[in-house]
Amino acid sequence: MNEEIELKDPVLPLGRPTLGSAGETGDWRTFRPKFIEENCIKCYKCWLSCPEGTIRVDAHGEFPYIDYDYCKGCGICVHVCPGRKKQKALEMVPE
Amino acid sequence: MNVKIPEMMDRPEVLLRGNFACAGCGLSIAYKTAISALNRPIVVIPACCSSVIQSLHPNVTYNVPTLNIAFAAHASAASGIARAKKMRGEDTTTVVWSGDGGTFDIGLATWSGAAERNENIIHFCYDNNFYSNTGAQRSGATPRGAVTTTTPGGKKEKRKSIVRIMAAHDIPYIATASIGYPRDLYTKVKKASLIEGYRFILIDAPCPTGWNSDPALTPELGELAVKTGYFPLYEIEKGKLTFSRRGERYRDPEKRVPIEEYLSKQSRFKKMTSTQILEVKKDIQHEWDQLSLFE
């Protein structure tokens, strides 16, 4: 895709949207969030607050899942998770 | 009425995974929430953290058309784009996405000109309180007592009130939002996108790297800033101020969470003395008093 731009016009400093433009940023983390399905109430607060967009939801009403290739392990999802009966649906476990 | 989460899920992804943002970045939350609310956005980004996290040529992490421009040229570049798109009859939204350095200090002249001409652009300022991409130097947005690399003993002056400067331009829409309340932010952006003219949205975006806070606490710090009265949430439409639902109740100093709770979660405030904390409390009250004059 990028070669295509260079062939057309080598002068223009144009870039194209690329997934993982900084490489697989999942290597950065020391703790990983682990998803516990039975405690999930599908409030999607983790999806809302994830800075990376690594919490993925395929369709409305589906359980979220985590893209570990790019998750940087900040722990925001675990912090915002309300959980069911005070049991969080996400927890941080060592990598 | 705030937007429902499923509606936000239907919007296209604007920030792709695997970028150079630090873990727990407040700016990323602000960007993906705010820009996804817009219809066909064209984003103008001056030098700031946003121009760093988009990563190296020829890869771009933003999934929308983006123009990188010099610090002091963002609003003028956006003015040109907005006018050209209007002449061509294309239905796009031109957006300035700048940091607090580019809005409070360096870019002030350029946005002031664009606001005076009432150009049809939305100006977002994500406020992380200093020049974060060059290594946490002091800016006009740095609050009193905060340690940065150029104020190692803590800043002595209070923070500039950019909203009151902006309000002096009599632009049609001004709002403040926080990444602690993403749905509130999305709703305000949606509202701003339906208004013509120069619109300004100030977003509180905590920066765990520069504030020396736990990355997991980023949204909580955003919420605490609102709950302590430190960052009031409101909208100014045609000169008339209304506090947001989340902001209204903290007008009463009794209902506010003690400011110490907010300050203690960030190591940048650890050099603050008790006199400085009292001064911060006075600053907060002063800001609320000044804002109530706009009502």
Image (cartoon, rainbow, N blue to C red):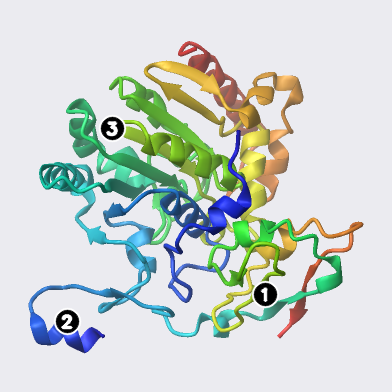
| Residue B198: mark | 3
Q: Residues within 10 Å of mark 3 (few under 14, many from 20)?
A: many
Q: Position of residue A90 (x, y in %)?
A: 77, 69
The answer to which of marks 2 and 1 sits earlier in the sequence is: 2
x and y, in percent, of residue B125 in the image: 39, 43
Q: Where residue B286 sits: x, y (%)?
A: 54, 19
Mark 2 on the same chain as mark 3? no
Kindly identify which chain the residue marked by label 2 belongs to.
A
- Residue depicted at x 16% and y 42%: B86
Determine the secondary structure under disc 3: loop
**Residue B125 visible in the displayed image:** yes
Asked whether the beta carbons under mark 2 and mark 1 sit within 8 Å of each other, the answer is no
- Distance, label 2 to label 3, CA atoms, is 35 Å
Secondary element at image label 1: strand
Q: Residue at x 67, y 61 (%)?
A: A46
Q: CA distance from mark 2 to mark 1?
A: 35 Å
Q: Is residue B235 above or below residue A2?
A: above
Amino acid at pointer 1: Tyr
Using residue B55 as the reference point, say whether residue A8 is left or right of it. left
Image mark for residue A5:
2
* Kind of residue at disc 3: Tyr
The residue type indicated by label 2 comes to: Ile
Residue B245 shown left or right of residue B240 in the figure? right
Residue with the mark numbered 1 = A65
Looking at the rendered structure, whether the residues under marks 1 and 3 are on a common chain is answered as no
